[in-house]
Amino acid sequence: MKWNPRELPVEVLDARIARLRAEMKRARLDAFIVYTNNVRPCAVAHLTGFTPYWNEGLLLVPASGRLVFATALSNRVVDWIRSINPVSEVTSTPRPGKFLGEWLAKDTVKQAGVLEFDAMPSELASDLAIAAPAIQWIDGSATFAAIRRGIDAAEQRMLERADAITIAALDEVNVTAISDAGALAGLVEKQARLSGAEEAYIAVSPDLVSDRRFNRISKPIALAERFAVRASVAYKGSWVRRTRTFAKDDSVRRADIWLEDVVRKIEAGKFFAGQLAACVDALPDAKLANWMVESCSGSYPLSVVASSRSSEGKAPIDGSFYVLTVEFLLDGGPWIGSTPLIIGKPAL
Amino acid sequence: MDDVARDIESGLVRPRRIETEWIMIADHRRARLIEAMAEADLDMLLVYGNAWQVDYLRYATDFGILEGQALALVRNDGHITLYLDSPLEVDRAELDCSGVDVIYAPDLIAEVDHALDRLRTHRIGTAPQRLLPRRIAGRAKALNLSDQTSLVDRLLMGKMESEITAIRRAAKVADEGYRVFKNAARPGRADYELIAEVEAFFRANGVDDNFQIIGVGGVEVRGMTPPGGKRLKRGDLVTTELTPCVDGYYAQICRTLVIGEPIAEQRAAHALYREAMEAGIAAVRDGVIAADIARAENDVFRKHGLGEYTTSEYTRVRGHGMGLFADSKPHLLENVTTRIDVGMALIVHPNTYHPAVGYLVIGDAVIVTKDGCEVLTGVPRELFSVPG
């Protein structure tokens, strides 16, 4: 989790903040507030490089000047936060909302955008409103999403690193050598963490034929002839997800190759559903059961932007990052695969 | 050692029996919750949860959420609807939560807000209030919502015997996890490699989740954090608290080791911290307040002229509750007046900065009894030394 200025130069963070400020100006926002905890870390991580491992915080992006990060993490870790977050003032306070509200009340702020305002924890929202009663608080989710259209080179490198970690972790799975789902999850997670993953959620479907759902497993549940592993891995705030099906027959490999080929062909501007339907024919005897596309446009690491569950969905944007998950019923049994992609680039 | 713990330790797990016990604990919790709701004259309870603050949600639904957020509506007849904004978590909840209606709600807050709109005539409690989404909390009056955080807090703090048994299991696994950690600590290894070893051990041994932080170094280290790639070297203090979760219940242990032989200052500091922890543990009994335990620990520091290092400048809490969350109420601080009751699970840990050696930790998990406490963690209270 240590900040590496070669991986994430301050200039890159400054450019992201500048993009947000340009959108704030377009939306007539005098300030912008972003919430973070370790479930919703990605917006603050995008702007500062910092992800909290515990507790919560609020980041204030004023129209100009240095950012202010107020966190309920204790004072003893403030220096550590500063070492990872090179672009903010950092304050430890039990009431981040009160602190930032009072800060803003001293300024000439009339309208402040708040990312995912509906979801803000009520105590923080209440403290902000009480401390700065003259400010009009507006949901700023669309403003923030505008700066997440397309990713910069630094983010691409982080995602590539996260993906390399994930692939190496899944490569540890040896279908002939392991028969216990709990031990398998431990093996994959260990490899991911040894490679520098700051977080790794490993879920297993131990018998894909009887149940295609995944769960985290820490008990010695037997692996069937066909099983699947989903690895969701974070590297310094950048998350990827890969799912791999393991079986002894050849149908798994053909589907793997199909998926890697499809992601290279996904085009910007055309809905995912149509593009996937057009590609399914390339995999004979396969019935498309489900699909899902995730992306990071707000505080969540990955959230669904299109899926077979919903008739609506967003069309892919050139240069943006997604994770595509596809579920097939093949002659040999079910197959599930997930892979990250960047629209317009041949591979992550 | 009971049969269940013996089975886990030997690896000869009998899943059916353990899962039956697990389901029974969840059923017992639900029954307690419904009873408490009836006493409070509530028709429903709305609980919020995420992977950081999971306890209120887990108490009601038995779901250990990982991604996204959740809201659950508990009816006074025991029916529960669990709303989740992640389809992956929906699959997990369907597998883990028997008897709960699981709903995929991509626009979680709007959908629950809409559901609550149709229930305006009901008396609905909410917990934990401070984390409830703003949009819903802001309509509390219109939706007939009342803050019932303290109702659930009482249930979370006062453990049933079955919960205490689960925490004992988690404490045993915490001991084992620390042994893995200690055996992994060698010069040249990166801090995250030690965590990787522990997590792999836990995943293979019944531990779904683990909260663990680490400190490596000397006087420059002011606290524990996630690993940052620091390589262990001779003379380093290596501090960790690990908090494994077994079937929903967390237990914690804190220990310090030295790479190579400890120097005199490190031994002296550790002896002081051990004295403080043992003073705190000696203060634990039914009827005291949290402040009494914290004061007993801090008085040892004051006696040695280090009272400054018991303040919020250098430390967060002197211990805390354990259970369905890694850091539960009550916090052990000198200004916390929560009564300590029989059956509470606590960790007593005087972790703080020491000016001569840096950040140092020691902590043991306990269950409160009438006249004292049962210490759950068994790793010796030494300042360990590993080959340097």
Image (cartoon, grey):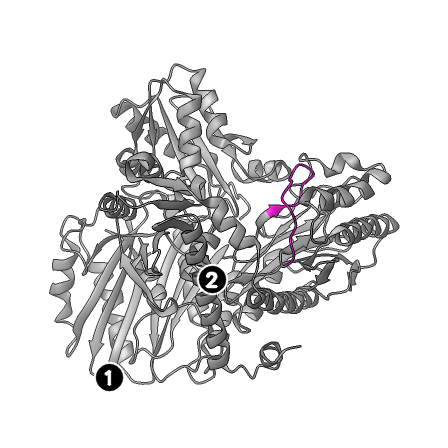
Is the same chain shared between marks 2 and 1?
A: no
Residue drawn at x 43%, y 45% as measured from the top left: A41
Disc 2 marks which residue?
B29
The residue nearer to you, when weighing B198 against B21, is B21
**Mark 2 residue element:** helix
Q: Please tell me how crowded label 1 is: few (under 14), some (14-19), or many (20+) other residues with Cα within 10 Å.
A: some
Q: In this view, does A187 lie above or below A249?
A: above
Q: Give the range drawn in magenta.
A: B330-342
Residue drawn at x 82%, y 51% as measured from the top left: B275
Q: Quadrant of the C terminus of chain B?
A: bottom right
Q: Which amino acid does label 2 sit on?
A: Arg
**Mark 1 residue element:** loop
Q: Is residue B248 above or below residue A174?
A: above
Does any portion of residue B65 appear in the rendered image?
no
Q: In this view, does A152 lie to the left or right of B385?
A: left
Q: In this view, does A156 lie to the left or right of B281?
A: left
Question: Is residue B336 highlighted in magenta?
Answer: yes
Does any portion of residue A79 appear in the rendered image?
yes
Question: Is residue A88 highlighted in magenta?
Answer: no
Percent position of residue B233, x then y: 73, 55
- Name the main secondary structure of what is drawn in magenta: loop
- Label 2 marks which chain's residue? B
Q: Distance between the residues labelled 2 and 1?
A: 43 Å
Percent position of residue A264, x then y: 23, 59
Q: In which quarter of the image is the N terminus of chain B?
A: bottom right
